[in-house]
Image (cartoon, rainbow, N blue to C red):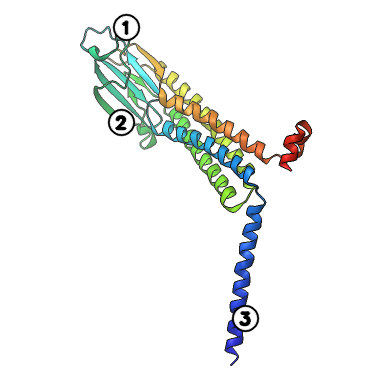
Amino acid sequence: MMMWPNFFMHEEDRRLGAVGRRRAHGARKASMTPEHEGKIKLALLLTSVGATLAVLAVGTEFWVELNTYRDNGSAVCDAAHLGLWKMCTKRLWQADVPAGRDTCGPAELPGEANCTYFKFFTTGEDAHIFQRTTKKEVNLAAAVIAVLGLAVMALGCLCIIMVLSKGAEFLLRVGAICFGLSGLLLLVSLEVFRHSVQALLQRVSPEPPPSPALTYEYSWSLSCGLGAGLVLILGSGFFLLLTLPPWPWGSLCPKWGHRAT
């Protein structure tokens, strides 16, 4: 006969525990006003644009284009484009090259393409492009810094998602720092990559055939990386502003401070 009272007592404890957890979760959500939550979502939307640009930049190989000159006495000319992970050489018909352009390209034109991944990630070998040799240490540094930036950016996204779903507002500042650091790392990666391009152009092979004269121009993947870094840093600033208490702004703008309180 003692089983039934114990059963009802356990059921009552379980019900009260569930109610307490729901109340605690509601209290955490209630501490964040709808206006504050909306501002966080807007800042997250901005940083999501930067995150998309960052992934697009790191995953594509149009960081820089290397172009030979058209005046080679042939109906075709050579061009190349490369990124952090692989390079592509292209043989283009000179008839397809825009009129008035002295060099071969742009690399988006249709032609016979040969794309290979850089071997310094696996075997440690340098790559050779138009009788020029890459400096693998600089290329590796640019790629590692970019991947580290993506990892920190993913951590920032996770922090902001926890703020919106669990009400853990203390993670808002952590997410802001992560986004700012990821944007800074992407910009550093761009600068390191620029040095790798300069090193590539200077490391001319002495072996025949002679190396052709080259020109270079940075392409749309690098522009995406630059935009991603700036947008992520801007989003980080917005998140940091949302972590500030309302009273400093109330002294400068009493109406805004009154609404915030």
Q: Is residue 160 above or below residue 72?
A: below
Any part of residue 201 in sight = yes
219 relative position to 166: left or right: left
Whether residue 187 is situated above or below residue 208 in the rendered picture: below
* 3 and 1 marks in contact (CB < 8 Å): no
Q: Residue furthest left?
A: 75
Who is closer to the viewer here, 202 or 190?
A: 190
Give 67 or 178, whichever is nearer the viewer.
178
Kind of residue indicated by mark 2 = Thr
**Circle 1 residue:** 100
Of mark 2 and mark 3, the one earlier in the sequence is: 3
Which residue is pictured at 79% across the width and 33% down the height?
251
Q: Amino acid at mark 1?
A: Gly
The reply, left or right, for residue 69 in relation to residue 73 is right
Quadrant of the snapshot with the C terminus: top right
* Res 84 → quadrant: top left
Q: Where residue 208 appears, x then y in whole percent?
A: 27, 15
